[in-house]
Amino acid sequence: MSTRTEYDSMGPVEVPEDAYWGAQTQRSLTNFKIGDHRMQRPMIKALGLVKHACAEANASLGLLEDEKKEAIQQAAREVIEGKLDDQFPLKVWQTGSGTQTNMNTNEVIANRAIEIMGGEIGSKSPVHPNDDVNKSQSTNDSFPTASAVAIVDQLRSELLPALDKTRDTLTEKAEDFDDVVKVGRTHLMDATPLTLGQEISGWIAQLDYAKQAVEASLEMVSELAIGGTAVGTGLNTVEGYPEKVCAALSDLTGHDFKAAPNKFALLAGKETIVEVHGALKTLAVALNKIGNDVRWMASGPRCGIGELVIPSNEPGSSIMPGKVNPTQSEALTMVCAHVMGNDAAVGFAAASGNFELNVYKPMLVHNVLESTRLLTDSMHSFTDKCLAGIEPHREQIDEYLERCLMLVTALNPVIGYDKAAEVAKKAHKEEKTLRQSIVELGYLTGEEFDEAVQPAKMVSPDPKP
C-alpha cells in the first residue's frame, strides 16, 4: 500500500496515500482495534453539520477567511451528504471524549478543503485541521454538540414519524373493532368484558405517553454545548460565537437549536442524554406490552387463545409443516429488550463523569442512535407486516365470552356480591352456565338473568340514575 508521511504532535505517521484522514486518525486505527462498531452515519453527518456551522460563525466574526470558509463548507457538505463515509473508519471504542473521531473529521475536511483549494493533501496548508476546521472548538464541546444534533435529527425525522404510523394504524383497528365485545383478562385470568377496540385504545394511549416523553426530551437535548471549548469556560472563542453556531445549525437542519446557558453541565454531565434514552426506554416498554399482547392473543391457532388472526408471513418451523409464528412480535420484543439494556449502559456511563468531563461520550451517542434506529425499524416492520393485517377471530371471541364466569359481575347490583360469588362457584364446579346456576339457586328467573347480564352493556358505565 502506498503511503504518505503526515505529522502530529507526537511525530511522523504513515497514512494511506489516497486517504483524506491524517495522522491522528491513523494512530487511532492502530491503537483501538476493538469490536466492529464504527461511528454511525447520523453522527458522521452531524459532525459535518457542526463543522459547517462553526466555519460560518467564525467567518461572520472575522476569525476565518472567506476562501477557507467556502472550502471547509464544501468539504463539510460532502461529509453531510455521505460522499466521504469511507473516510471515517474509527471505532466507537476509543478515547472517551471522542477526540479521535473529532480529529478524523477535522483531518478529512481539512485535506478535502486543501484539495479544493489546489494544495497538497497532508500539508496542512492552506487549511489546517486544528487551526481552521477546529477553530473556536474543543472536542469536549464539538463532539457532544454533534451528538445532540444527530439525536435530534434522528428522533424528529425518523423515530417520531414511525411512531405516528404505528399509532395511526392502531387507531384504524380500534375503530374497526369497537363493536367486538370480548373477555377481559387480569392476572392472566378471565375478567369482565370490554371491546377489542377499547383494548387497542389502551395501546394507543401508551404510545401517546411515550411520544410525549420523546418530545419533552427533545427540548432538553436541543440545548448545545458548543462554545464551552475545553472545560466549559469558552476559552479561545469570542462573545456571540455559540449563538451564531446554533443559528447556523438551525438553518442547516430545520431543527431549533440554542446555546446551553451552562456549558459546564453539558461537558461534564449527561442528564439530557439520560432523558432522551429514558424516553426511548418508555417507548420500548409500551411496544413490548403491545407486542406481547398481540402474540398472546394470536396464540394457537387451535390450542391457544386465538382471538386474533395475524398475517402469515413465512413458514414458522423447519420440522412442523404449516406452522406460523408471531415473528414480528418476537423481533419487536427482542429490540425492546436490547433498548432496555442500552438504557442501563447509558445510565451507568452518564453517572460516571469526573470533574469537568464525562469520558463515555462515544458509547453514549452510539447507544442512543442504535436504540433510535432499532425502534424506528421495528415499528415500521411490526406495523406493516403485522398490525396492518390483524383481524379478530370472532367465533372464538364469542365462544369465550359466552363461557366467561366473570359476567357474573353484572349481578352484583342485583343480588349482591356474596350471592353472585356463589353463582359463579357453582357454575364452575358443576360446569354449568351462569344462567343455569342462578335459576337453580332460585335467585333470578332466566328472563331476569338475561335482562341483567348483557355483555355489550358491560363495556361502559351505567347512565346516570
Image (cartoon, rainbow, N blue to C red):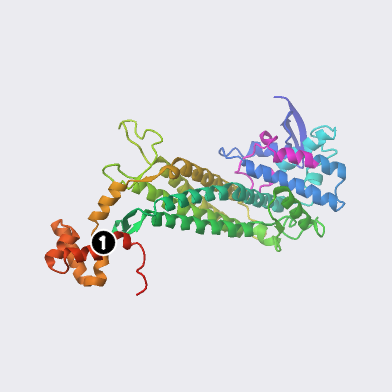
Give the class, few, some or many, for how many residues have Cα within 10 Å of label 1's Cα (few <14, many ≥20): many
Residue 319, image x, y percentages: 31, 31
Q: Is residue 434 left or right of residue 382?
A: left
Quarter of image, res 189: bottom left
Q: Is residue 333 visible?
A: yes
Quarter of image, res 122: top right
Whether 79 is among the magenta residues is yes
Residue at 65% x, 52% y is 148
Residue at 45% x, 40% y is 385
Residue 401, image x, y percentages: 27, 54
The residue lying furthest to the bottom in this view is: 465
Bounds of the magenta span? 72-101
In this rendering, is residue 226 above or below 373?
below
Disc 1 marks a residue whose amino acid type is Leu
| Element on which disc 1 rests | helix
Residue 55, image x, y percentages: 80, 47
Q: Is residue 448 left or right of residue 462?
A: left
> 347 and 164: which one is in front?
164
> 422 and 72: which one is in front?
422
Provide the residue designation for mark 1: 407
Quadrant where the N terminus lies? top right
Whether 51 is among the magenta residues is no
Residue 152, image x, y percentages: 63, 51
The residue lying furthest to the top in this view is: 1
> 90 and 46: which one is in front?
46
